[in-house]
């Protein structure tokens, strides 16, 4: 059974963007509820160790924080939106339901990292870089003892550094793109552009101290092993990311962490019907989306790092407060930071794109969707023999994206492999997370659930 | 390029079935869709091929013909295209309709009796027999009827298999082409279909635009009343045990025949080949409003849980929905438009288009060839008052 609560501003996501939005909105005196699925504040970048009791972040007085609370749906209501929330550990059968009516909504749901498929990527021991880092930061667990970090972008460095921090040997970092010249000329310069010089110097020092080689234009193109990964084949790539024949090398590792940029966590923005462009939420200078009363900040609007996310959050929080009638001073400093941050984000996007040659890493029997075990040949067959050229029909013919992850892992890859020119083609999920049938049955605050006698809910 | 004889607008299951039947009769067919094939309503529904939910009358007759035709058609396609390309997950698993309240028990028995008189296999079963057919079903049953003829297929596979046959016979399937009207010659004879990619000369056009058929008909100068009726479905994670039949709450029958705008749900619970369970479905007349409503999902969940208490803790992975195309008198529209020579319609199948597609395609092909139809086509004719007089201005 659900109860309804009213809050003038609801912020969803407690990463750098959501925290900044919460503070900015609460500073105006507005009444704010901050909701995050994690037990602690901070989001991905500031992920805290879940095992300890202390909390690194303080929220302004009066802010209501719903921890371990996932927003599984939002719907429009008169004068705002209603967020439907379940609170409790993700797998617990005893989560409670709340719905919160808000006059303004700030979406700050962040992004998850993208893995590209290659033969053997479905072996145990192959992780996304983000998962490897989350395990290291959140649980103190190393995914392996000899780990290869591969992919593209400056985010690989903190991942390697976190792995070293929990005792893993990082055998190398492979950057699929070329080393960038000019102000992004070294891997550590990239993030420094966002005002992170100190942090990056620390990563650099870690890499040097641990003698971790950094190789540009190289990628893992195959993982080998019987029950889990035992070795990988890496290859040098041409400008398009096609492997150069003869450049293959084999390395013995017991884990691989791969990260090829980020995919925004769009489902709430899609169900709020915010306009998207190139797979991100479109916002104006006040971080307002195309839907009145809905603001967005952070990786949802573009990938540009934690500093930019926080600046966007500050502006979104102020704008949301203004939307509910609070007296607000224009957040000029944050707006300036957004402008320079976006320039940096654009440079980042240009320097570390995903190039189409990755498709040549796949073989006919390489899985493109792990949940439903759909291989590349089956995906091509769906398109070529069954006219499955749209995301809906492609899913239903090939089954790619129909499994438990609902396309979060494979959606962007499947779209690209099938020539569907919309990175958000698989992002629509009216239910943002799975819910038990009994939770759904009790979700409607205006109805009394009729539960079969004898069934404990 | 050789001109087609016939252009079918809309590559949903209905357009695909018409194109298949016309090409089997020897016509050169081109199918157009403004989007991707089989991505409209056909990708938004379940794949029930039912006789159980239909009262005696013309729609039941069409459903009975279609139920008979589907397996024959799929077998013929398997012969022609090979089993893999023709696979549509056809499963003649049978349906079980149960009443859970005292007030619905008698109407269910009467309904089944009338269907038996019309030639439907509708076998009354006791609560114990129902429990044997469906071990996890609620014990709170007041009446139950077993319908062995009810079957299921996967709509997108079915539609794309039909389209593959059209192509194998030299026809064409073009996506991303929107039909915007038709062109007649000076004497008023049909000349071409107009699209956003140019005109296509042909002898006839079939409007199979599903819930958007009214818009194309208006563009072609012959408006018909086809309206959308929203429906939502829930999908669970794959389960180790299964629901063996298609199991309906007897309230299904009432909702199908009703025209209420407000929310109606009628529970249908069934498992698919991969172990997921589909829970359908709601009916709302809200135009083309795609807004997602939690109360609709909650209602579906409550009723499914009442029918199968064991499902209470099963994770629901997703919800999806679409717009059933319906005519104000709730009968499909199949045939030539007497107002515009060369214009044909095959639409308005509401919540039964998957089931009715096979017989609809055959009917269009027979009417086009001026042959006698297997089922009386006159109830579905285009120029009935409900279809051409009630069109909103
Ligand atoms: C796994 C991972 C690790 C990263 N590590 C680093 C790093 O070490 N250094 C670095 O510079 N950058 C890192 N990045 C990039 C960094 O995440 C971003 O720059 C920054 O954290 C983005 O901030 P954000 O507020 O937009 O989103 P996030 O920090 O991702 O926060 C989003 C929050 O929203 C919550 N959320 C999402 N959906 C829901 C929902 N439906 N209901 C409730 N809560 C929800 C999530 O629980 C999460 O806490 C990492 C990214 C990822 C994906
Ligand atoms: C929730 C739900 C559950 C259902 N369950 C069942 C069931 O179990 N059994 C059953 O039999 N039926 C069921 N149905 C009904 C069934 O899905 C429909 O009757 C059937 O899919 C209609 O098919 P169609 O080909 O007429 O329409 P569609 O599949 O919508 O095809 C029409 C096509 O026309 C195209 N189009 C439209 N306008 C133009 C234009 N101007 N130019 C070019 N192309 C155009 C569209 O892009 C679309 O692809 C269900 C429906 C819903 C919504």
Image (tube, coloured by chain):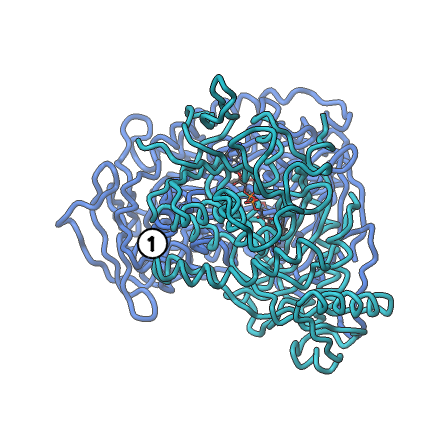
Chain colours: A blue, B cyan
Question: Where residue B168 sits in the image (x, y, percent)?
Answer: 33, 49
Q: Which residue is mark 1?
A: A376
Residue farthest to the right? B103
The residue at the far top in this view is: B186
Residue A45 visible in rendering: no
Relative vertical location of residue B128 with respect to residue A211 in this rendering, above or below = below
Image quarter of residue A300? top right
Q: For this view, does A291 lie left or right of residue B198?
A: right
Instruction: Give the residue at x 51% y 60%.
Output: B70
Between residues B136 and B287, which one lies in front from this camera angle?
Answer: B287
Q: Position of residue A61 (x, y in %)?
A: 75, 40
Q: Please say if B183 is above or below B254.
A: above
The picture places residue B175, in percent across and down from the top left corner, at: 43, 37
The residue carrying pointer 1 sits among few (fewer than 14), some (14 to 19) or many (20 or more) residues within 10 Å by Cα, namely many
Q: Quadrant of the N terminus of chain A?
A: bottom right
Residue drawn at (77%, 52%) of the image:
A444
Whether residue A283 can be seen here: yes
Nearest to the observer: residue B89 or residue A382:
B89
């Amino acid at each position: 059974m659900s109860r309804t609560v009213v809050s003038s501003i609801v912020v969803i996501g407690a990463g750098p963007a959501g925290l900044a939005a919460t503070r900015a909105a609460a500073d105006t005196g507005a009444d704010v509820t901050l909701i995050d699925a994690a037990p602690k504040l901070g989001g991905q970048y500031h992920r805290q160790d879940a095992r300890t009791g202390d909390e690194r972040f303080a929220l302004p007085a009066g802010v209501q924080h719903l921890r371990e609370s996932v927003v599984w749906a939002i719907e429009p209501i008169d004068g705002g939106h209603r967020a439907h929330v379940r609170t409790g550990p993700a797998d617990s059968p005893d989560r409670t339901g709340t719905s919160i009516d808000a006059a303004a909504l700030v979406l700050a749901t962040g992004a998850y990292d993208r893995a590209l498929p290659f033969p053997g990527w479905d072996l145990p021991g192959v992780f996304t870089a983000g998962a490897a880092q989350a395990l290291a930061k959140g649980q103190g667990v190393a995914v392996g003892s000899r780990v290869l970090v591969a992919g593209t972008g400056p985010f690989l460095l903190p991942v390697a550094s976190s792995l070293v921090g929990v005792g893993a040997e990082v055998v190398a970092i492979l950057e699929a793109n070329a080393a960038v010249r000019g102000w992004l000329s070294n891997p550590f310069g990239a993030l420094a552009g966002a005002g992170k010089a100190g942090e990056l110097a620390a990563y650099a020092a870690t890499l040097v101290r641990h003698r971790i080689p950094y190789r540009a234009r190289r990628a893992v193109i195959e993982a080998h092993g019987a029950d889990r990964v035992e070795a990988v084949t890496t290859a040098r790539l041409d400008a398009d990311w096609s492997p150069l024949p003869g450049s293959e090398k084999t390395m013995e590792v017991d884990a691989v962490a791969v990260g090829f940029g980020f995919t925004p966590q769009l489902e709430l923005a899609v169900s709020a019907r915010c306009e998207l462009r190139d797979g991100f939420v479109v916002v104006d200078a006040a971080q307002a989306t195309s839907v009145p009363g809905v603001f967005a900040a952070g990786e949802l609007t573009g990938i540009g790092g934690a500093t930019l996310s926080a600046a966007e959050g500050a502006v979104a929080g102020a704008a949301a407060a203004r939307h509910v009638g609070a007296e607000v001073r224009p957040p000029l400093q944050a707006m300036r930071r957004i402008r320079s941050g976006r320039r940096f984000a654009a440079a980042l996007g240009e320097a570390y794109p995903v190039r189409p040659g990755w498709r040549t890493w796949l073989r006919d029997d390489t899985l493109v969707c792990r949940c439903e075990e759909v291989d590349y040949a089956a995906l091509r067959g769906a398109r070529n023999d069954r006219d499955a050229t749209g995301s809906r029909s492609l899913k239903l013919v090939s089954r790619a994206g129909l499994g438990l992850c609902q396309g979060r892992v494979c959606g962007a890859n499947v779209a690209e492999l099938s020539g569907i020119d919309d990175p958000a083609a698989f992002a629509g999920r009216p239910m943002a997370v799975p819910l038990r049938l009994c939770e759904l049955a009790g979700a409607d605050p205006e109805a009394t659930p009729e539960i079969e006698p004898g069934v404990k809910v | 390029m050789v001109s087609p004889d016939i252009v079918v607008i809309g590559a949903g299951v209905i357009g695909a079935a018409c194109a298949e039947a016309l090409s089997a009769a020897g016509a050169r067919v081109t199918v157009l869709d403004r989007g991707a094939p089989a991505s409209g309503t056909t990708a938004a529904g379940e794949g029930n091929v039912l006789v159980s939910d239909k009262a005696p009358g013309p729609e039941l007759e069409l459903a009975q013909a279609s139920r008979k035709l589907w397996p024959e058609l799929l077998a013929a396609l398997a012969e022609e295209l090979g089993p893999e390309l023709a696979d549509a997950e056809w499963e003649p698993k049978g349906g079980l309709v149960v009443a859970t309240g005292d007030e619905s028990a008698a109407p269910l028995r009467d309904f089944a009796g009338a269907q038996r008189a019309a030639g439907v296999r509708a076998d009354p079963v006791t609560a114990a027999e129902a429990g044997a057919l469906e071990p996890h079903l609620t014990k709170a049953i007041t009446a139950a009827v077993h319908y062995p003829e009810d079957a299921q297929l996967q709509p997108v596979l079915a539609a794309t298999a039909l389209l593959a046959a059209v192509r194998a016979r030299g026809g064409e399937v073009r996506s991303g082409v929107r039909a915007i009207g038709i062109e007649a010659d000076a004497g008023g004879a049909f000349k071409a279909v107009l699209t956003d990619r140019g005109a296509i000369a042909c002898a006839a056009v079939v409007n199979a635009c599903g819930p958007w058929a009214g818009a194309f008909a208006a563009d072609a100068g012959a408006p018909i009343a086809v309206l959308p009726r929203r429906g939502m479905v829930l999908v669970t994670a794959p389960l180790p045990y299964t629901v063996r039949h298609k199991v309906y709450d007897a309230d299904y029958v009432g909702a199908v025949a009703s025209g209420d705008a407000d929310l109606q749900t009628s529970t249908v619970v069934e498992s698919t080949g991969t172990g997921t369970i589909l829970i359908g479905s709601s009916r709302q007349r809200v135009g083309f409003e795609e807004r997602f409503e939690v109360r609709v999902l909650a209602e579906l969940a409550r009723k499914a849980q009442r029918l199968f208490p064991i499902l209470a803790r099963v994770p629901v992975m997703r919800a999806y929905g679409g717009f059933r195309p319906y005519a104000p008198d709730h009968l499909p529209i199949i045939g030539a438009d007497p107002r515009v020579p060369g214009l044909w319609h095959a639409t308005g199948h509401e919540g039964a288009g998957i089931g009715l597609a096979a017989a609809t395609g055959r009917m269009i092909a027979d009417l086009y060839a001026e042959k006698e139809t297997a089922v009386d086509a006159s109830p579905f004719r285009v120029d009935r008052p409900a279809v051409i007089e009630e069109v909103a201005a």
